[in-house]
Image (cartoon, rainbow, N blue to C red):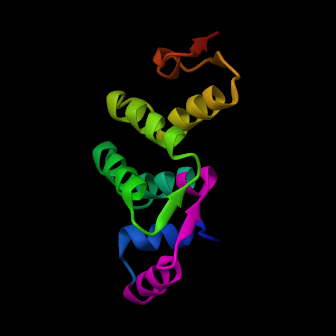
Amino acid sequence: MRAVDTNLLVRLLSRDDEVQAGAAEEFVSSGAWISHLVLVETTWVLESVYQLDHRAIATAVEMLLVHRDLALQDPDVVRAALNHYRSRSSLGFSDCMIVEIARKAGHLPLGTFDKNLARVPSAERL
């Protein structure tokens, strides 16, 4: 299976360049994989560059989870991170992914100085 980078995924979601969006669609049409890193970078770009709010970013991640041609790395991890993200508007998606990746790897609690992140189960504020 092919893999996608952040720029390609952003074009699929933003549709701000017809030519690149079309090329991206064609590339993923036979199936493509999205790594955690690409997903986290994409959510950062959507927030920072495209000024999408928390709800819109959650919707974009959900769309990727159910996309017919795209496969996310560890979709169970992404789904759990998305649940945290939706329930805590003070957290970034990357923080939610960090907790869930650590959980899947069996490395908890997650130590943090971030008071908002510490409210997530399995995170511990130092």
Residue at 36% x, 77% y is 16
Residue at 42% x, 72% y is 12
- Quarter of the picture containing the C terminus is top right
Give x and y (percent) for residue 6.
Answer: 57, 65
Residue at 37% x, 86% y is 18
Main secondary structure along the magenta-highlighted residues = helix
Q: Residue 91 appears in which quarter of the rendering? A: top left
Name above or below for residue 71 compared with residue 86: below
Q: Does residue 36 belong to the magenta stretch? A: yes
Give x and y (percent) for residue 97.
Answer: 55, 37
Residue furthest to the bottom in view is: 19
Name above or below for residue 115 compared with residue 72: above
Q: Does residue 31 belong to the magenta stretch? A: yes
Q: Residue 110 appears in which quarter of the rendering? A: top right
Q: Which residues are magenta?
A: 18-39
Left or right of residue 92, residue 114 in this image = right
- Give the camera-side residue of 47 and 84: 84
Give x and y (percent) for residue 64.
Answer: 41, 58
**Tally of numbered tags:** 0
